[in-house]
Image: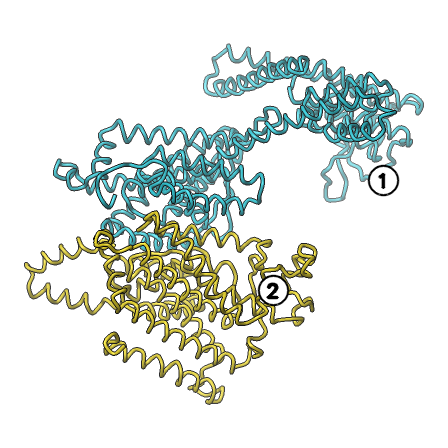
Chain colours: A yellow, B cyan
Amino acid sequence: MRRTLSKADYWFLGLVAVTGLVILPCLNAFPPKESFFHVSDFKVSLYGKYLCYAVLALSVDLLWGYTGLLSLGQALFFALGGYALGMHLMLMIGERGVYKSKLPDFMVFLEFPAKYPDTAGLPAHWIPFYNFWFATGAVIWVPALLALVFGYLAFRSRIKGVYFSILTQALTYAACLMFFRNDFTFGGNNGLTDFKDILGQNLNSPATKRWLFICSVVLLLLTFLLCRWVTATKFGKIQRAIRDSENRVLFSGYATANYKLFIFVLAAVIASLGGALFVPQVGIINPSEMAPEKSLEAVVWVAVGGRGTLVGPIIGAVGINALKSYSTHSWPEYWLYILGALFVFVTVFLPKGIAGIPGQLRNLKKRMSRPTENMITAQVSTADTKT
Amino acid sequence: MGRGALQLSTTAFFRRRTVSRVKLCVTGNAVFRRNHFRSAFISFLLTAFIVARAWSAAPGADRAALVQAIIGEEGDQAELVSKLSASSDSLVGQTLEAWRVGEVFLHEASDGAKIPFLLDKQTDADGKARANRILDGEPLRDSSGKPLSFTATDLTAVDTSRSLRKVIKQTLDLMALSNPDPKFRRDAASRLGFEQNQDYVPFFESRLATEKQGDVRKALAEAIAITQLASDNADARKAAIRQLGELRSISGQNLLREISAKAQANPKTYDAETLAAARAALTAIDEYIFWGNLFGTLFRGLSLGAVLLIAALGLAITFGLMGVINMAHGEVIMVGAYAAYVTQNIFKARFGESGFGFDIYFPVALVVAFAASALLGLILERGIIRFLYARPLESLLATWGVSLILQQIFRAHFGAANVFVASPSWLRGAYSVHDVLFAYNRIFVIGFAACIVWLTYLLMTKTAVGLQIRAVMQNRNMAACMGVRTNRMNMITFAFGSGLAGLAGACLAQIGNVGPSLGQSYIVDCFMVVVLGGVGNIIGTVSASIGMGIGDQILQLHVQAVLAKVLVLAAVILFLQWRPAGLFVTRNRGLEG
């Protein structure tokens, strides 16, 4: 661990840990409400949401930045994690729903008791979700299983590059359509909402919100460390080799499909964990969360922040979401222009994102000082980066 | 079978003749507009007009009879009214309807003659309405020639007894059989048949003798058979059962099922022959429905496939040939659709909402849509995509950004709600063969798809530009060495692919909604079509889109639409396991394909 983490990493981790674990929770808990330093409960949940998105961005980066697999379906795994925990929270509402029934509201509304008379209206696959630990387990194994099956099929037939992107997009689109259906038993287009409490704690109380936020910070830090560890080992080296020239790795005797499969499943689980923490803080999960454009948005965070780094995606996710919250509030009609322009600008002018700006500046400076020699290297480097 | 087949073929014959006559009329009309001196067409028009007049019988006599009935003695009224049942005059129908609900009034003229009249629907400021004479529909005038107006509450309506009202109702129903609109005639025949009133049979038969429209003839024949199912005569019943089977009557199916169930339950009252006939008829009808469904499904699948093909063809060029992932492809389609909308509005403002002037907007819209989208494609290529040829995954992201911006621009300008694009009259309606509906716009889409695929094929294989495009796509450096201006070819190819997407948009505007998110609903399908077909291969794109379209429609017979779509996507993913490069592979020796 000593060698894998750089000085900058220590600084970054330290900063996140101090701000996220100490300063923000304290500012939320202690100063009086009207004080300048007070951070409202709403803000705490909002920042928690950004951090969950940052976890999603890390999973996209692990695939795209480090392995060269641009998955356009990562939000699907994020949403699956959300749904798995959401199901548990839904069952925990008990009889406090609108219909005062033991069933979740949407099941009463959609007349499930008539459809599933054997289990008093609750579809059989919902029953184990009364147990919190089962739900937590499902957050991990459901996306992992889906990623395993889909990844196995895709990598076995050597679907790569653009085709992989299009197929993952089709996957999330298909899943999104399924979840929109009422008889898919996950609440249709309203999704799951109106949660009351988690592990017996009221979800609306400031203390619960604070703890959920702290959990998000911890999750982000752990994910960061995990990604750093994975990418710094020999495994990570092969991973990057696959990104740069898969055929050479294949010819050197490595089963690249298995490497890619492992990363794909790992990224799915990471995204899913982010989704699971997202749901109690936001209070709703619905199929639009797995719509194709959500996955694309996550890719933008990574592209803007800087792929192939771990700090970049986190900055990108938090920064763009903060910008989104601000601009959808202040000038809603311009948000899509901003996002679209950001997309175009970053891909054309900043191929390495914000995290790559120092490097680009250094290059520019070098080119200024030694023009002829660098012309050649620049050409070679553009020819090399065919990702 | 023999008689039914003969009947069907004769009806088809009749219909073909009527349709062609109508068509000739229309073309004649158009030519007439252009050239006043085509006397041949004038004489033709005259003949058509005379035929139409003769066909609808003399209207004056019916009105006079109606007036007689209204002012006549109570005992004669029923008989006079029931004689009107062969009339095809709309004013007679209108008056009878009004009489039944007590809205026919009498005016006593200065010479003591009684003139029945109706009140106009429109009332003036005082709540008074014009009085229109029943005899000729002209307004009643006082001695000075000024039109008279009345208020309905001030007048007493002409009386009707209960039995008379019943007669009027019957007459109205039977009159509908001779309505000039074939749709009304067909509906009336079906409705009256289910009343199973034996008295109607002669009416049906007399109508059948003069009726020329094929589907109305079938409805009349069905009505006769269905009525005779309730006949007292056992032989007539059996004949009716057979007749229904021969007619492949879908509407008679339920009645036949009832009969077959009853015959099975009490074999004593029904003889074995009835049961056998009913069963045979039901089998025949089921078979007929099966084939009808099959062809209907295939047609719908084909038209859906054509829609996918039109939408994906542009992508097959920009993605398949050039390797540019244009996520804004859907928005280019949208631009085409809105171009059609704008053209339509301009034509609407200039020529009104219907007629010849409005109907020609569509060909113009196709040109406008192509030009607008090609221009957009040109700008996109010059502005963004040419920097990203070496980085396909990033062209995906940049073009998605463009798609967001375009969507928002159109949402801001045209509103978030869907806009309505009216089809020209020659694309509305449907053609029905053996109870299978073929909508004109769907037929058009299929033909249009075939057309643009053919044109694209010609362009790519038979022209110098096509040759250069293919050379650049296959080996850019070599083509450049041979003196092909690769930059310009990229531009042209991308603009052409975008233009095709624009055509797709104008075409989709005829069959679906046009809104800012139109592109989003096609983009995933389009990419799937291109990937499934095999990249860089037009034949592959054609087979993939038609395969996906038909597959989707066949699945929809068994599961819901959304589930069918999901299953098609899953099937495509699984199919790529078997053939990772799609249906048709362009083989080469390169490692990276």
Which residue was labeled with disc 1?
B154
Q: Residue type at mark 2: give it.
A: Ile
Task: Depth check: give the residue in front, A158 or B228.
Answer: A158
Front tag of 1 and 2? 2
Give the image quarter of residue B225.
top right
**Label 1, label 2: how far apart the Cα atoms are:** 73 Å
Which SS class for mark 2? helix
Task: Depth check: give the residue in front, B116 or B4.
Answer: B4
Side of B291 relative to B386 (left or right)? right
Side of A139 relative to B585 (left or right)? right
Chain of the residue that carries numbered disc 2 in the rendered image: A
Give the image quarter of residue A237.
bottom left
Q: Residue at horizontal 29%, vertical 48%?
A: B380
Side of B359 relative to A335 (left or right)? right
Q: Residue type at mark 1: give it.
A: Asp
Residue B265 makes an appearance in the image: yes
Q: Residue at horizontal 87%, vertical 31%?
A: B158
- Pointer 1 with pointer 2, Cβ within 8 A: no
Q: Residue at horizontal 10%, vertical 66%?
A: A366
Which residue was labeled with disc 2?
A127
From the top left corner, tell me how far across and down residue B522 is, in percent.
44, 45
Side of B445 relative to A181 (left or right)? left
Residue B372 makes an appearance in the image: no
Chain of the residue that carries numbered disc 1 in the rendered image: B
Relative to A54, is A41 above or below?
below
Farthest-out residue, front: A253
Relative to A317, is B310 above or below?
above
The quadrant of the image that shows the N terminus of chain A is: bottom left
Relative to B150, is A189 above or below?
below
Using a 10 Å C-alpha cutoff, classify the residue at mark 2 as few (fewer than 14 neighbours), some (14 to 19) or many (20 or more): few
Task: Depth check: give the residue in front, B521 or B51.
Answer: B521
